[in-house]
Image: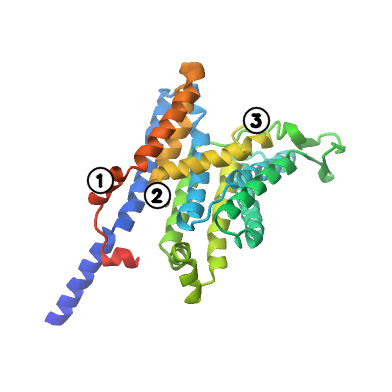
């Protein structure tokens, strides 16, 4: 009887340790930060305390957070430097535009249905393309991988910049480089080459962005603390050792790459539904670098830091707009200072000292 009670008490203590483990606390903190921020912003928005400038940033901030979370999975967890995140965003954005345009032309006016299908299709298309790209790309490492993904993003931008897509009663019509699309009466041009997408119904909203952020965090955290996640991190830390014990490195890294691409596609689809018009040049090399900056400043593998850093760095240029020509100079100085501080050894030592010690259960998890 006493042995049984001792065993039961031991199990309860073990459960309590797992409940308050660093991994659980980290996830809980991230969810709380996002939920509290959503509640506060919703209250401020409903009360009219937010100006039009900051209201217009609510959805873009959500889009960049989702894309940055996906990239952090790829760079911070998998250890692969991906400079083509903006390319996957463009795939999601223009796929979403085509889907929502088709639905509206066919008389489907329900905002929820249109937005949901646009995001789902954009996510699937970006994930599928990410899988196809990963087959040759993930055979490379380091700088070579970064260069190839960078080239991929530029190729996608150039292709979309020369595509013309229209829809009428006869279905979809395509042309490349030259606009030869002839539509029946009632038809609509969805993508017009360098002009991009025009006449897009603005269906995106802050609530949808919040839901997508939560879903992204759930997907990423469940992967990180799963068997596949541990395999991904093992391949990141020591590829040769992982191969010697029978791990299929290419498959584990492909999983992270595809999920990262799919999240970027979801972010792009939401972003595309937030503007009446936008061009492929919006998703150029500079956008990929900005997303990478958000990830690096937030901390590789740190999802809470990514959410906070992305929010601050997206809002800051607009907050400094009253400084006119000096705002980007100040923005650059802030970036430099943040980078120096976050990479300072004394700062790292301070956080290490105040960091809770990992229990055996957390390490195992």
Looking at the image, is mark 3 or mark 2 nearer the viewer? 2
Name the mark nearer the viewer: 1 or 3: 1
Q: In this view of the protein, can residue 333 be seen by the observer?
A: yes
In this image, 182 relative to 252: left or right?
right
Q: Residue at x 32, y 56 (%)?
A: 24
Q: Position of residue 38 (x, y in %)?
A: 41, 38
| Mark 1–mark 2 distance (CA, rounded to whole Å) | 17 Å
Within 10 Å of disc 2 (Cα), the crowding (few <14, some 14-19, many 20+) is: some
Q: Secondary structure at mark 3?
A: loop
Determine which quarter of the picture holds residue 178. Answer: top right
Q: Earlier in the sequence, mark 3 or mark 2?
A: 3
146 and 25: which one is in front?
A: 146
Determine crowd level at label 3: few under 14, some 14-19, many 20+ residues with C-alpha closer than 10 A: few
Discs 1/2, front: 1
Question: Disc number at residue 163?
Answer: none
Q: Quadrant of the N terminus?
A: bottom left
| Image: 352 above or below 207 | below
Quarter occupied by the C terminus: bottom left
Residue 302 has which mark?
2
Q: Residue 276, which numbered label?
A: 3
Say whether marks 1 and 3 touch (CB < 8 Å).
Answer: no
Q: Which residue is mark 1?
A: 350
């Amino acid at each position: 009887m006493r042995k049984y009670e001792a065993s039961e008490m031991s199990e309860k203590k073990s459960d309590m340790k797992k409940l308050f483990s660093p991994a659980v606390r980290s996830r809980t903190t991230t969810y709380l930060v996002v939920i509290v921020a959503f509640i506060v912003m919703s209250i401020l928005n409903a009360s009219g305390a937010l100006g039009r400038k900051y209201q217009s940033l609510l959805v873009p901030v959500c889009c960049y957070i989702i894309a940055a979370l996906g990239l952090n999975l790829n760079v911070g967890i998998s250890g692969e430097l991906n400079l083509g995140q903006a390319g996957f965003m463009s795939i999601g954005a223009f796929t979403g535009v085509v889907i929502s345009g088709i639905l509206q032309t066919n008389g489907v006016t329900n905002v929820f249905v249109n937005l949901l299908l646009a995001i789902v299709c954009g996510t699937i298309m970006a994930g599928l393309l990410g899988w196809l790209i990963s087959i040759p790309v993930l055979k490379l490492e380091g700088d070579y991988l970064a260069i190839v993904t960078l080239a991929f993003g530029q190729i996608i931008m150039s292709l979309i910049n020369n595509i013309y897509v229209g829809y009428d009663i006869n279905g979809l019509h395509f042309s490349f480089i030259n606009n030869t699309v002839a539509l029946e009466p009632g038809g609509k041009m969805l993508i017009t080459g360098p002009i991009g997408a025009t006449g897009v119904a603005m269906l995106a909203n802050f609530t949808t962005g919040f839901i997508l952020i939560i879903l992204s965090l759930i997907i990423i955290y469940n992967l990180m603390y799963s068997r596949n996640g541990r395999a991904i991190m093992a391949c990141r830390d020591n590829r040769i050792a992982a191969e010697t014990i029978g791990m299929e490195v290419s498959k584990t890294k492909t999983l992270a790459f595809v999920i990262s691409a799919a999240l970027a596609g979801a972010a792009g689809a939401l972003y595309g539904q937030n503007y009446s018009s936008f061009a492929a040049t919006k998703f150029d090399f500079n956008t990929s670098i900005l997303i990478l900056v958000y990830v690096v400043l937030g901390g590789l593998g740190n999802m809470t830091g990514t959410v906070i850093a992305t929010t601050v760095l997206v809002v800051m240029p607009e907050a400094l707009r009253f400084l006119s020509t000096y705002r980007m100079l100040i923005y650059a100085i802030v970036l430099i200072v943040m980078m120096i501080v976050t990479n300072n050894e004394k700062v790292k030592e301070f956080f290490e000292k105040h960091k809770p010690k990992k229990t055996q259960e957390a390490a195992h998890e």
